[in-house]
Image: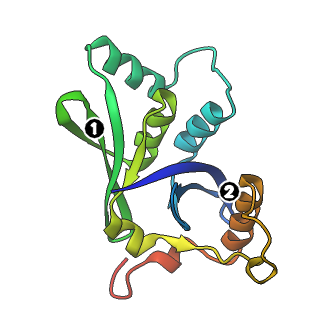
Amino acid sequence: MIKMSVVGIRMDPPQNDPVLLLRETSGERYLPIWIGQGEASAIAMKLQGVSPRRPLTHDLIVDLIKGMGRSLTEVRITDLQDGTFYADLVLDGDVTVSARPSDSVAVAVRLEVPIYAEEQVLAEAGLVIPDEDEETGEPEPAPDDEVEKFKEFLDTISPDDFKAPDGP
């Protein structure tokens, strides 16, 4: 398992589909996951420190976990099949609940728990965005620079680029 961090949400032109961007905490690979508008908003709101007047669905999930006396220990991005990502919410006692990665990350950012991805998922869908300053020896880019580089990269790809050659 590879520990990941949430870089942010980006709208992918021209369809304006939201993309969740995760990055290896000790590596160079990024993991882009196309997600729904609702989940994108829920993640972005939490990352920006915005509190809704009423609990959102992911806040309800957090309240349910806590209300049942359980705790979320981590989120795992476990698989990628036919262009669809799969994830697990891992509760105390190693109880796992299958969930979409977007929902899993929305809950994880609320509870500040680690997010992991299986190596095979990163091997298949992870991207290394070349550092344009490699030759100059400049220091590693700041997180804002990473997001800008990824935005530029997203302008050149589409979800179709991740489809299997023989299938959807």
The nearer-to-camera label among 1 and 2 is: 1
> 73 or 154: which is nearer to us?
73
Numbered tag placed on residue 90 in the rendering:
1
Q: Give the answer, above or below, for where 81 lies relative to 54.
A: below
Where in the figure is residue 165, as x and y percent of width and height? 38, 87
Q: Mark 1 or mark 2: which comes first in sequence?
A: 2
Where in the figure is residue 124, as x and y percent of width and height? 39, 75
Residue 137 falls in image quadrant: bottom right
Q: Give the answer, above or below, for where 11 lies relative to 122.
A: above
Q: Give the answer, above or below, for where 132 lies relative to 45.
A: below
Where in the figure is residue 145, as x and y percent of width and height? 77, 60
Q: Give the answer, above or below, for where 77 lies relative to 160.
A: above
Q: Amino acid at mark 2?
A: Met
The count of marks equals 2
Name the residue carrying label 2: 11
Q: Mark 1: few, some, or many residues within 10 Å (few <14, many ≥20)?
A: some
Q: Mark 2: few, some, or many residues within 10 Å (few <14, many ≥20)?
A: some
Residue 94 falls in image quadrant: top left
